[in-house]
Image (cartoon, rainbow, N blue to C red):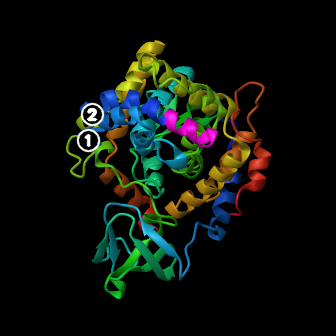
């Protein structure tokens, strides 16, 4: 078994430990996941049933990590901007876009971060955040849709989930399965590592370009101006990045504009 | 907002709108294979959201594109049912690859009746709650909980109304 595959199996089992203990009470639809997880801890075969191939995590695991990552994002970015009207607007536009994403297994939710920074983030499991600074910069629904569509594509194509499977940051988690007392600490480490990738290091440029192209197409099929993301990026490029944090987790805007599909 | 900024925004918006008709969407063509991605997808008599339903297909059904009209596709079931099952479907309601997981009722915020959206909101998972507690992030947890409740207030009827009023999705002209 390749090292990457071992990490997938181990992380899947580790997260399953955390999810399974409590998920059953909240989600009757999950079924007897706790039992499945117990078996998974005993044999590699059972573990393989939980860790799903290259993407690594089950839906329940993805949602558990995504929820916790969302808490981390909100904590690090000044909390949620509790503006009911603006929150309603981002949920309206975001969920209309998400209706036409490939993944309909997720409960899509959209929120605003109370930060002057110019940025947007997506957490595994269907949660999308946009900073107040970026929201207030975008003049109309088309530009907002362009930004939200980009973030939806990150989730739709499991960019963070795949990163969990492939990133070396999780390489040190081997050997923890025998020590269940440390399971939650390791869950928290997984969450922090994912949050760091989303908030600090960002995805690699090709992943961002893929989200740009996919977001362009998603906005277009939904009926928003396909040039919305381009217009948003041009607007963002006018912001003085010496005074404000501007898309620090994304490739340079000029590169993104060059790679965006033609209008 | 300064006059310069307003001018810049107006110019950018006008350019984006002017270029929109030439957009290259994720298009499907005659002969392509597509897959349904909802629990139930209606195949309509005409390329309109108001047209009669001719047939329905379940999740991840393979469909063959026989004709296109704008963002609408005339499809037929790509299996033994052959010509018996077919109709028009909005291209946003199908995927170019087979979806892996069906819409999970246990994880959706609201049910079809939309009668009590806040009560139906899925709360944070217990693992995330414990994470917040351990990190001393109680305020962030409360914020996410508020956000979930606000999100749940947006119903499917709200989405449909917005789409109809603003010509989005199936309601595009």
Residue B33: x percent and y percent?
A: 50, 75
Which image quadrant is residue A27 in? Answer: top left
The local crowd at label 2, few if under 14, some if 14 to 19, many if 20 or more residues have their Cα within 10 Å, is: some
Q: Nearer the viewer, residue A129 or B30?
A: B30
Which residue in the structure is indicated by mark 1? Answer: A31
Q: Nearer the viewer, residue A11 or B140?
A: A11
The residue positioned 74% from the left and 24% from the top of the image is A243
Q: Nearer the viewer, residue A201 or A242?
A: A201
CB contact under 8 Å: marks 1 and 2: yes
Above or below: residue A81 compared with residue A160: above
A8 inside magenta stretch:
yes
Q: Which of marks 2 and 1 precedes in the sequence?
A: 2
Q: Secondary structure at mark 1?
A: loop
Q: Nearer the viewer, residue B46 or B12?
A: B46
Which residue in the structure is indicated by mark 2? Answer: A24
Above or below: residue A23 compared with residue A139: above
Relative placement, left or right, of A1 versus A16 is right
Residue A65: x percent and y percent?
A: 47, 32
Which image quadrant is residue B20 in? Answer: bottom right
Q: What chain is tagged by disc 2?
A: A
Residue A38 appears in the picture as rendered: yes
The residue positioned 56% from the left and 31% from the top of the image is A132
A5 inside magenta stretch:
yes
Q: Which region shows up in magenta?
A: A1-11
Residue B31: x percent and y percent?
A: 53, 82
Give the number of callouts: 2
Q: Secondary structure at mark 2?
A: helix
Q: Main secondary structure of the magenta part?
A: helix
């Amino acid at each position: 078994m390749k090292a990457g595959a071992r990490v997938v199996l181990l992380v899947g089992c580790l997260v399953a430990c955390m999810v399974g203990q409590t998920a059953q009470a909240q989600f009757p639809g999950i079924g007897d996941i706790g039992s499945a997880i117990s078996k998974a801890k005993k044999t590699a075969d059972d573990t393989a049933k939980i860790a799903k191939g290259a993407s690594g995590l089950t839906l329940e695991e993805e949602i558990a990590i995504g929820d916790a990552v969302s808490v981390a994002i909100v904590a690090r970015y000044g909390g949620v901007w509790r503006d009911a009207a603006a929150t309603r607007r981002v949920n309206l536009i975001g969920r209309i876009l998400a209706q036409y994403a490939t993944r309909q297994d997720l409960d899509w939710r959209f929120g605003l971060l109370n930060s002057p920074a110019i940025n947007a983030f997506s957490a595994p499991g269907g949660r999308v955040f946009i900073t107040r600074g970026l929201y207030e910069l975008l003049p109309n629904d088309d530009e907002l849709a362009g930004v939200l569509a980009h973030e939806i594509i990150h989730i739709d194509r499991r960019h963070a989930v795949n990163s969990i499977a492939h990133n070396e940051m999780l390489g040190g988690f081997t050997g923890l399965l025998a020590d269940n007392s440390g399971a939650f600490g390791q869950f928290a480490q997984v969450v922090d590592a994912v949050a760091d990738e989303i908030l600090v290091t960002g995805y690699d440029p090709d992943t961002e370009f893929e989200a740009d192209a996919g977001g362009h197409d998603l906005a277009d099929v939904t009926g928003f101006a396909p040039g919305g993301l381009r217009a948003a990026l041009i607007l963002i490029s006018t912001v003085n990045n010496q005074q404000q944090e501007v898309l620090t987790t994304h490739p340079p805007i000029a590169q993104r504009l060059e790679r965006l599909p033609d209008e | 907002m300064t006059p310069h900024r307003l001018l810049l925004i107006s110019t950018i918006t006008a350019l984006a709108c002017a270029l929109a008709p030439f957009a290259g969407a994720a298009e499907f063509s005659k002969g392509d294979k597509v897959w349904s991605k909802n629990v139930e997808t209606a195949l309509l008599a005409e390329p309109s959201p108001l047209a009669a339903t001719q047939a329905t297909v379940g999740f991840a059904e393979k469909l063959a594109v026989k004709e296109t009209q704008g963002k609408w596709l005339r499809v037929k079931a790509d299996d033994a049912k052959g010509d018996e099952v077919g109709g028009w479907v909005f291209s946003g309601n199908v995927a170019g690859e087979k979806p892996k997981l069906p819409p999970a009722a246990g994880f959706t915020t609201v049910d079809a009746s939309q009668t009590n959206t806040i009560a139906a909101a899925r709360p944070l998972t217990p693992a995330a709650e414990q994470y917040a507690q351990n990190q001393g992030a109680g305020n962030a947890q409360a914020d996410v909980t508020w956000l979930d409740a606000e999100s749940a207030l947006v119903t499917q009827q709200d989405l449909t109304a917005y789409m109809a009023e603003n010509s989005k999705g199936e309601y595009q002209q």
